[in-house]
Image (tube, grey):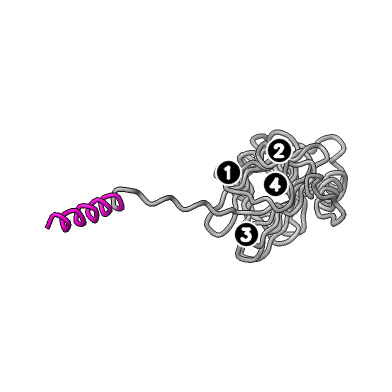
Amino acid sequence: MRYFRSILAVVLGSSLLFWGTPPAPAAHSAIGILTLATHAHLNEAMAFPGLSVFEGERLSTDGEGRLGVRAGHSILTLGPKTEVELVSINGGLHVDMSVGALHFSGAENEIVEVHAEDAILGPASTRPTQGTVIIVSSKVLQITTERGSLNFSYHGEFRNLPEGKTYQIYLDAPGEPQEGIGAGVEKAGVATKVTYFIVSAGVAGTIAWGVHNALKSENLPISPAKP
């Protein structure tokens, strides 16, 4: 009888221990992987291809840096002096961009949403999208819609940006093209908070496409940290 009571006490103690211990939290899965890195950083560490990127981590590049990220079937490429943070959202990826130039290629049915200077840029449909976002200066953006139209919103104001154009966008104040950018620029409309210029030819368009081509180059060097 005493032996039976001892066994019962061990069983009950084990049950209480099991029920009293909360389950270990599931490890967070990576939301992307680095495919290209030169003069680039993941948080404070040097970045190199193959590193996983988790939600909220900071990606940045130096003056001669490039960095590529694959998230699902979508691709991001950071140009020089660029800094972003990635956040997973339902159906895709949210990119918090604080400075620099970003090229993105969103796969079909995958959202790539870019947040820059308090403005939000996202796909207008479930079709594949490609574009470039450049923070020119405080409250000035340059956006090229390479494939698929994009929806642009800023503090409650909304506009659709059709495919195949480069836009110079001034936030919060009606703006005029900066000196040297006026030639070949069509004013697309003046709104309460945002002024848009469609760049049909001239310096601004050349800058946008130059950044686009540099970011897509297949001859970029890989990270010197890669073995």
- List the residue tagged with mark 1: 56
Tell which circle, 4 or 3, labels the residue nearer the N-terminal end: 3
Q: Give amino acid for label 3.
A: Ala
Q: Residues within 10 Å of mark 4 (few under 14, many from 20)?
A: few
Q: Check contact, mark 1 vs mark 4: CB within 8 A.
A: no
Q: Give amino acid for label 4.
A: Gly
Tell which circle, 2 or 3, labels the residue nearer the N-terminal end: 2
Helix, strand or loop status at disc 3: loop
Numbered disc in front, either 3 or 1:
1
Point out residue 31 in the picture as x, y percentages from the top left corner: 60, 54
Asked whether 111 or 11 is in front, the reply is 11
Tell which circle, 1 or 2, labels the residue nearer the N-terminal end: 1
C-alpha span from label 1 to label 4: 36 Å
Tell which circle, 3 or 1, labels the residue nearer the N-terminal end: 1
Q: Main secondary structure of the magenta part?
A: helix
Q: Give amino acid for label 2.
A: Val
C-alpha span from label 4 to label 3: 20 Å
- What is the span of residues highlighted in magenta in the rendered image? 1-18
Helix, strand or loop status at disc 4: strand
- List the residue tagged with mark 4: 189
Q: Give amino acid for label 1.
A: Gly
Numbered disc in front, either 1 or 4:
1
Asked whether 83 or 200 is in front, the reply is 83
- List the residue tagged with mark 2: 99
- List the residue tagged with mark 3: 124
Q: Check contact, mark 1 vs mark 2: CB within 8 A.
A: no
